[in-house]
């Protein structure tokens, strides 16, 4: 990947008002793609499993009447009880141990005592753990009670987009093919793909190269190599593909038309013959 194009894309993706976010600046300063050693892979696998187990743990607690702040407190408690640290807390000033994004919030929703879950809500909970110095990153959608048919279709489509992207992971395949299949399927279902946020390398640091776009040209980007670890985290919108970052808190990204958004995320290892979903705690993805 050409570094100048990478920086330009990131600056465009995270531009906010008249300046760039700290997150964009950090991403634009990243170096080359890190090929992880077996020892590093083992550490990242453990951290990714813990992140996924955190989402398993919080599942029965997600219900009407609960605040997102309470969910965040339980998430932090679980992570710390297992000898890890929530990576988001204090990251560039972010105040919480998770991102909890309801309904029209695309990502980076800040947990709050004022946000109370109600019947019909959909939400994404995004957790990143640091265990023994290694990062694991994953997110999942939750539905509160009975939700609308449109919300169900959006969630199912988003999950299938993630699965299609994962199936593209193998050595020698251009990275852009992940975004190509995700975008093609999402649009075939009448939805749009958020282009302002992307997946990323992870494991040694919170955000590393490569940038994993969820809408891309076929056969574009660098070739995948065994030992790469990155996230795939498609954000699919019911309406327009654009998001607007809240001017007050500097984090919360909402759909520009306030229609629903959904996201799923896994941390993926490129194996010599395919992939391993490091954040799969439920045995849903066989190692290839």
Image (tube, grey):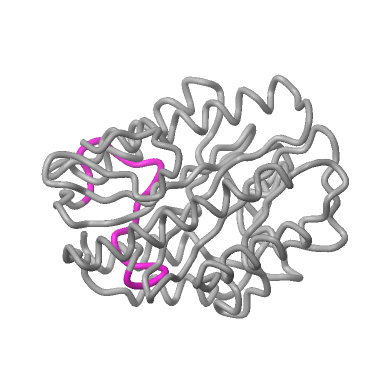
Residue 122 in the image: state x and y as whole percent.
71, 38
**Between 223 and 37, which is closer to the camera in this rendering?**
37
Left of 75 or right of it: where is 62?
right
Left of 207 or right of it: where is 217?
left
**Between 284 and 228, which is closer to the camera in this rendering?**
284
Q: Which of the 4 image quarters holds residue 261?
A: top right
Residue 217 is inside the magenta segment: yes
Q: Is residue 164 above or below residue 212?
A: above
Q: Is residue 212 above or below residue 191?
A: below
Q: Considering the image in quadrants, where does the C terminus appear?
A: top left
Residue 16 in the image: state x and y as whole percent.
60, 67
Q: Which of the 4 image quarters holds residue 239?
A: top right
The residue at the point 34 percent across, 41 percent down is: 216
The kind of secondary structure the magenta stretch mainly shows is: loop
Q: Report the span colored magenta.
A: 204-221
Q: Considering the image in quadrants, where does the N terminus appear?
A: bottom left
């Amino acid at each position: 990947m050409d570094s100048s194009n990478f920086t330009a894309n990131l600056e465009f993706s995270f531009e906010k008002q008249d300046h760039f976010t700290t997150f964009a600046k950090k991403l634009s300063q990243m170096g080359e793609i890190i090929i992880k050693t077996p020892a590093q892979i083992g550490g990242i696998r453990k951290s990714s499993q813990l992140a996924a187990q955190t989402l398993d743990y919080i599942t029965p607690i997600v219900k009407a009447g609960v605040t997102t702040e309470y969910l965040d407190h339980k998430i932090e408690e679980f992570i710390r009880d297992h000898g890890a640290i929530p990576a988001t807390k204090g990251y560039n000033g972010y105040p919480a141990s998770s991102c909890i994004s309801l309904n029209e919030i695309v990502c980076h929703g800040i947990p709050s005592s004022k946000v109370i879950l109600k019947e019909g809500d959909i939400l994404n909970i995004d957790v990143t753990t640091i265990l023994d110095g290694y990062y694991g990153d994953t997110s999942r959608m939750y539905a509160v009670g009975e939700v609308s048919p449109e919300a169900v279709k959006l969630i199912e489509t988003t999950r299938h987009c993630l699965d299609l992207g994962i199936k593209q992971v193998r050595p020698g395949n251009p990275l852009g093919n992940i975004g190509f299949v995700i975008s093609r399927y999402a649009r075939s279902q009448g939805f749009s793909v958020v282009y302002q946020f992307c997946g990323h390398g992870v494991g040694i640091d919170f955000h590393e190269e490569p940038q994993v776009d969820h809408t891309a040209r076929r056969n574009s980007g660098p070739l995948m190599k065994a030992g790469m670890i990155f996230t795939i985290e498609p954000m699919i919108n019911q309406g327009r593909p654009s998001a607007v970052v809240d001017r007050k808190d500097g984090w919360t990204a909402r759909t520009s038309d306030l229609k629903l958004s959904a996201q799923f995320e896994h941390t993926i290892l490129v194996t010599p013959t395919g992939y391993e979903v490091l954040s799969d705690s439920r045995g849903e993805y066989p190692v290839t």
